[in-house]
Amino acid sequence: MTTTQEALLPATRRALLHRIAVAQAEGRAPSLVAAVVRDGQAVWHGARSSVDGHGPDETVQYRIGSITKTFTAVLVMRLRDEGVLDLGDPLEKHLPGTGAGESTIAELLAHTAGLAAESPAPWWERTPGALRPELSDVLGEQPLLHPVGRRHHYSNPGYTVLGALVEELRGAPWEEVLRAEILEPLGLHRTSPQPEPPHAGGWAVHPWADAMLPEPMEDLGRMAPAGQLWSTTGDLARFAAFLARGDERVLSAESVREMRTPAAPAEAADVVDGVTYGLGMQIQCRDGRLLVGHSGSLPGFLANLTISVEDDVAAVVLANCTSGPLLGAVGADLIRIVAEAEPRIPEPWRPLREADSAVLELVGQWYWGTHAFGLRATADGLLALAPLTGGGRKARFRPNSDGTWTGLEGYYAGELLRPERRPDGSVSHLDLGSFVFTRQPYDPEAPVPGGVDPEGWRGIG
């Protein structure tokens, strides 16, 4: 992916450089490299390094840790889209004998399968994967710590299981499937399970002194689908664009949107923090902005990929230290800097090519009891319902062949909106999941449940 530095204003580029310079200096990272994506293209690349005259560019590999999980999730979603599996299938149907077979594929993707966070000792990130050659070595004697489906509990073994599932259903090693189905189609030629020069070395920085210690770089073996990959800011910029827009060669826009949708019950602390998890993607609300992506870490490395779909801006930040800079905060700040300094310019408004009289008959103001709503036709052929004042339930609806509409999100997701007609064919009211919407508040001419007082509206006296 070619980086077009001129695509951002000089002041914006300087603000981005200042942010990563502060992160590298205050976080005491041997090196830190970042990229920003806008409109599906890399528009900025920056780097800071402790080595004079050495600034890693967008081709230098860093280990990306758990961002690997998002790649594994894409492979599973491809199997779903091909009809090979259903997300509601229990694991036992496709991969028997694990001891976690009652968990569904969706629960494994969302870290709600009840599995332990880590594999049994010794610490898997700093020991050879050869110590855990079988799934049973990864899952241990008691794989389940929590009731299945009841809570979000981040699980590295869960993604090891998903990698094994991919291998079972594809009949090939996870690495080969990954390369054939994601890396090659998206042109991610600098992403690999093993480091390929040029790559950064992993370091631990002493917490109380400016001294460093090299970290071991182990092959994770069975745990590879949870955190093995090495990549670059250039490749992850392409991957971020894919996660925002989809690519029919790999996964549709609808399916990546599903990955970005919350799928895990939030803990009380998560509600306070504004974070949750989708299908292989982390989701958070930060400074009023919805961000999706994934973080990653392994001894010697930190990584973060963050996307604001609404702003059409993404950021990738990589560092070669075990701890130090808070890359999630850096990524969010890089997005904020671009989104606020150079807001997205909307596409020109254009009228519909054709106006459907049946749809125009439905749009306008409606009342659910005394609550006023507006129903609008959108350019993509949907209907959008929203309160006219204040907050409340809103949703978009897609048309069905029988004249009804199905809700796509929120409270009305999956619910049916049915225009009910009078004998003369005109619309009397809307039935939305049994709620009656009328053109006037409690219209006496409409079949309002419970009826309408015949004396009508009145004053207090």
Image (cartoon, helix red, strand yellow):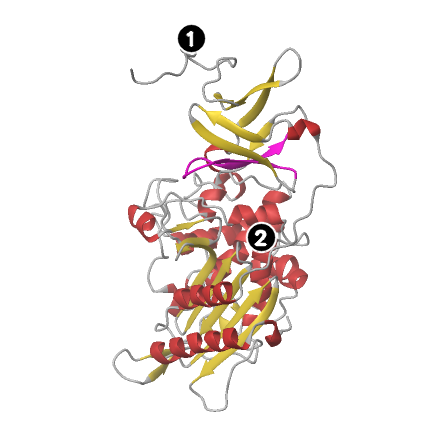
Label 2 environment density (alpha carbons within 10 Å; few <14, some 14–19, many ≥20): many
**Residue 236 in view in this figure:** no
Task: Give the residue displayed 65% in from the left and 62% down from the top.
Answer: 186
Label at residue 296: none
Which of pointers 1 and 2 indicates the residue nearer the eye?
1
**x, y (%) of residue 310?**
53, 54
Residue 260 in the image: above or below residue 89: below
Give the secondary structure at mark 2. helix
Label at residue 454: 1
**x, y (%) of residue 62?**
49, 73
298 left or right of 418 in image: left
Task: Give the residue displayed 39% in from the left and 65% down from the top.
Answer: 329
**x, y (%) of residue 258?**
54, 45
Could you say which is closer to the camera, residue 183 or residue 23?
Answer: 23
**x, y (%) of residue 309?**
53, 55
Could you say which is closer to the camera, residue 453 or residue 62?
Answer: 453
Label 1 environment density (alpha carbons within 10 Å; few <14, some 14–19, many ≥20): few
* Residue picked out by circle 2: 75
Three-letter code, disc 1: Pro
Mark closer to the chain start, 1 or 2: 2
Query: What is the distance, in whole Å, between disc 1 and disc 2 at their CAs?
Result: 61 Å
In the picture as drawn, the residue positioned furthest to the right comes out as 353
State which region is magenta. 381-400
346 left or right of 216 in image: right
Three-letter code, disc 2: Leu
Could you say which is closer to the camera, residue 191 or residue 10?
Answer: 10
Which quadrant of the structure image shows residue 234? bottom right
* Mark 1 vs 2: CB contact within 8 A: no
